[in-house]
Amino acid sequence: MAWWKVSSAGRDVNPDLASERQSPSFNVETLTNILDEGAEKTRIKRAVVSVIHKDPVFNREFLYFKTRSERHEGAVRNSLHLKRKMKEMGWDENGPELPYIYRALGGETGFYVHEVFIKTISALGTDEQISKWLPLASNYKIIGSYAQTELGHGTYLRGLETTATYDPGTQEFIMDTPQITATKWWPGNLGKTCTHSVVLAQLYSNGKKHGMHPFIVQVRSLKDHAPLPGISVGDIGPKMSFEHIDNGYLIMRNVRIPRENMLCRYSQVLPDGSYIKSGSDKINYFSMILVRVKMLRDEVLEALMKACTISVRYSAVRRQSELKPGGKESKILDYQTQQQKLLPLVATCYSIDFTSKYVAKFYNDVYDELRKGNFSSLPELHVLTAGIKAFATEICSNGVEVCRKACGGHGYSLYSGIPSLYTKVTASCTYEGENTVLHLQVARFLMKCFTGAQSGTPLPSSTAYLSSPPAGGCQAKTPADFLNPEVYLKVYEYRAYSLVTSAAKKMQNLMQSGSEQYLAWNGTAVELVKTSIAHSHLWTVKIFVSAVNSVSSDPEITAVLKRLCDLYALHGIFTSAGDFLQHGYLSGKQLDMATTAYLGLLAQLRKDAVLLVDAFDYTDEQLLSAIGTYDGNVYHNLLEWAQKNPENKKVNPIFENYLKPYIHGNPSKL
Amino acid sequence: MAWWKVSSAGRDVNPDLASERQSPSFNVETLTNILDEGAEKTRIKRAVVSVIHKDPVFNREFLYFKTRSERHEGAVRNSLHLKRKMKEMGWDENGPELPYIYRALGGETGFYVHEVFIKTISALGTDEQISKWLPLASNYKIIGSYAQTELGHGTYLRGLETTATYDPGTQEFIMDTPQITATKWWPGNLGKTCTHSVVLAQLYSNGKKHGMHPFIVQVRSLKDHAPLPGISVGDIGPKMSFEHIDNGYLIMRNVRIPRENMLCRYSQVLPDGSYIKSGSDKINYFSMILVRVKMLRDEVLEALMKACTISVRYSAVRRQSELKPGGKESKILDYQTQQQKLLPLVATCYSIDFTSKYVAKFYNDVYDELRKGNFSSLPELHVLTAGIKAFATEICSNGVEVCRKACGGHGYSLYSGIPSLYTKVTASCTYEGENTVLHLQVARFLMKCFTGAQSGTPLPSSTAYLSSPPAGGCQAKTPADFLNPEVYLKVYEYRAYSLVTSAAKKMQNLMQSGSEQYLAWNGTAVELVKTSIAHSHLWTVKIFVSAVNSVSSDPEITAVLKRLCDLYALHGIFTSAGDFLQHGYLSGKQLDMATTAYLGLLAQLRKDAVLLVDAFDYTDEQLLSAIGTYDGNVYHNLLEWAQKNPENKKVNPIFENYLKPYIHGNPSKL
């Protein structure tokens, strides 16, 4: 067949990619099993992925050509079909298949916030409320949303303005949006789908304000989906990504709901309007932390792993310029500058993978303690998850964009698969807690620990370095010394210690010169953010080092993980060198040594690069990338996808409507 | 009227924004005139902008709701309408209005590459060719494209594979795409619009290869726009942005074109197939440099200026959390962390503005010299434009994204206007020379200068610091010393000097230990890129310092520009501290002082922030941002735009097609 009639049938693996897999220095499957936490999970994952891919309803082939409406419709269809599919396959809501199902669908499902609606009622409703609402929601007799954020209020929940005023005369709450800034804004499923919503509102009863509480409000008719009286509801419009989600707005003008619609497991309003607290809702705060724990792996790391897979494979296929004058054009992966862009990000994937597992385990441990009534580790859990969330979303989002740019022009085409990863993952920097706000919360904890250390209070293990920092300067004398985790762990500890110390001192100085505490805090905020980054960064290095020593007894696997860990640590030193040099723990000469060690690792890991991303074990259907397929037939895919583009098959109105009058000499007809 | 029926008619300026403008420390109009290079130009600009905004054909109101096809159609319509408009207004192709026209249209025009087609023929065609093709193209009797990049080949032009083989028997060239990687890919106007294209191809004649040459190839019928025999042509599909451009692909299978279709001002093929060079085409290389010079202001800086305007105004309106416990929620611009995100970017706008003017002037000077036959400054011009292009596109793209994230959730909505700025400007990092490739070209020049300095060869003024680096360490003793340009210019010079020196030494060492030169180069590439960044960064600081001293005699203007220049310089030291500390020119304590000076400037410039972006003088129509309008009615705009969304007026198929069967109890009907 002529080469320009491209087809994916019966293709060989591109020799440039095949050669990368010829003599692996470790067993790729073993590494995949480690990432999956066991061969059995790898098996389940692949079975799930295969079932999803084979189902034509879930086909994502034309995703990049679809409009927002088509994407939203497709996501709703997927969700409804998935329910049937799960029943058919015997997959359980709590079964081991669940995370793989959503990953296989590429997040293209429509009822995520409906699930939040269900979980909120389960967590905050009484047994009676649960038994009333859950069967309705679970069977899609009603579709729910969760309306918290307002036009003028995001991360700072206390600022929310929507009101729920109790009327003892009718035993109803009057739900109201008092002014424009109180308009509910952003909730998913609100724009075009839901019939009901949990609405967070300031409760007023008998003239007293009782703070934020959750209420179930019906917003659309079950008969014809029209907004109910007093309700204005609609879609908030196009976003950078999330085309498949109908984020919406909601205005309520004195909408009355029955008293029973306040979710009252932890507090209730009696018929006469008296307000009763009935227990702590700390467990609810816990569920917010769980969202941060889960998003780490399922959304944030997922995006970077896919972007690395695509860009590393492409870099082993793409050839450009001659490294050796007069030689063949070289694979771009052979350029040190390309290795410097991509290999540290591959290492970052492994780092964040181990970190996300550590955080999940820590979460479970604290949860177990909590159920026994022990709340002592809660602050540490909050700090760990807040700091890692902010740290990981930032490096993963930026990393995806580095991968995209590293693919040059083709990275700019949606067909590369990377633009849509970026436009989606970057949202994680602002949702579930804006990153700067989270970093400052971590910093507050670090300042407290520092003050504690000064007065001899024992510190939690995560900040023990504040009371016993590494002393005497870095001992490294050669580049090879920097491949010793004990050496670089101390370097990272000293960096965090010195940043915390100098921020604390600066605050003290400001206050001693008469600044009020809040002004001193704000005048140190830029440096405080740096303490949180340094602390969280240190944690990721610690967790990686410990994982290298524990996840495998296979010496080849351990060796390659060790190299990745070293690369991750030294890359951090190379790119944030100022922090490490400023307080003299590391000298300029030692930084040179660390750089030499770092660049040496790039060259070493170059040969494992493709295998290290193969181990992430994504199917071509999951990657949805013309330039990142397993077989590396980059150019065939690009041409084939372009030829499939429905735009190229439609009648083109440009000629008839615009050009013809000019070309045929009658432009005055226009 | 009820508040939820929002309208923009007769609104007051939001008091939170009005208060920012109450007691300016400088005259905003004067600063606008400086940016425009004279009050007369400001006048012309505003007149042009007003004419464009008033014309309903150019209305961009519903841009964020449009599909790719609608965007492309709109851009073609705009271009054709613009031609008539310019005639009507008496605006000339070379008149002072031109840059403002395109800026007012927000780049939403369709014939950019058609213009490149025209310019290429003018530059590389003979007088005969020009008089044949130009009238056709200028009157849209034919529509042109410019096809250079191929599927497998981008920045490295020598790698292009398309062939043009001369057949003396018929006096024709046979144009051919020999294999898939040679498919022309990316040219604008090729996908759905053009009838002809300049095609770059390897010329073969009488069995000899003569390198890349330009040929005019007709690709579509003038009668019905169908591809001509042997031609496959189409749109390459969706990209991250540039929805309005039909980037296309082109495959030619032995397509014959007449000998006269080779553009032969500088080389030609005679009827018998003999090949003749007739002059140097250096002047053509010059036009590539011109593209880089122009894109700096019109595309790259434009995006950052708009993003800064939007995010700074929004930050003066948005309130979140209490700075002072128990106080009112604070403007987010009052948080040091927000100032640290935005104010250095405002300063960067001013820096890149002055830099782009400097580069344009340097270009014109060298061009004048060139016409006198003096080519000596060409390498320096190349290095300056390549380095500044790579440096500025990177910081401006990243800066736009920082602005977007600094607007929190609303920055993620297309209505903020920033997402579309980012997805467009980020392309500039890879087009017109991939940034890493450009940096390495600059580094090659720096290495040559360094070697020259070692042997006493006089250096061009831009690299004079390599032969006489600042000596004796930084003399600053207080934070205030860092507000002295002489102090920080030396710090920047030393940084560039030390990075160049250590990269050169490393290369020498590698070669002395037996590495071949190309391997030593690749083994130093990461550090070489840093030399180019440091060199270009130094240049932007130098140019800014010189502008502060020359652009105005108004002391208030000079004072605010001086603060911006200091901020720009100290921000660079703060964020790339490692480079400045590593070789000991700056001590850790001095870095502390520089940081103190830097944070102090943030607080000082806070009060001028809104005025400094007002001075960029963008209309609301140009910004196309709900959160960045001059009147600061952020929340009204967001709600109004959401209510205007055509999606909210259409019948929603979700209920009828998907939900109703569940809600009404008959899901089996699905």
Image (tube, coloured by chain):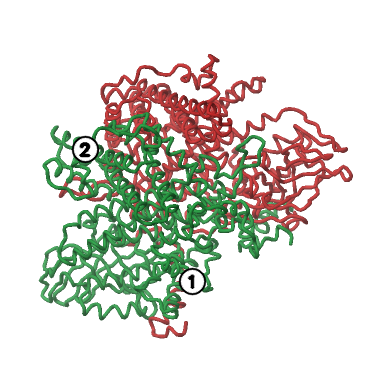
Chain colours: A red, B green
Residue in the foreground of this view, choosing between B1 and B610: B610
Q: Chain of mark 1?
A: B
Residue at 47 percent across and 56 percent down: it is: B306
Q: Is residue B369 positioned above or below A395 on the image?
A: below
Nearer-the-camera pick, A393 or A305: A393
Q: Is residue A613 visible?
A: no
Q: Find residue A20 and report its horizontal and vertical position in percent.
A: 29, 40
Question: In the image, which disc is placed on residue B501?
Answer: 2
Quadrant in which residue A495 is drawn: top left
Foreground: B536 or B283?
B536
The amino acid on which the numbered mark 1 sits, given as a three-letter code, is Ile
Residue tagged 1: B52
Q: Quadrant of the C terminus of chain B?
A: bottom right
Q: Is residue A211 left or right of residue B460?
A: right
Q: Where does residue B227 sit, x and y in percent of width and height?
A: 35, 73
Q: Position of residue B430 (x, y in %)?
A: 34, 53
- Chain bearing tag 2 is B
Q: CA distance from mark 1 to mark 2?
A: 53 Å
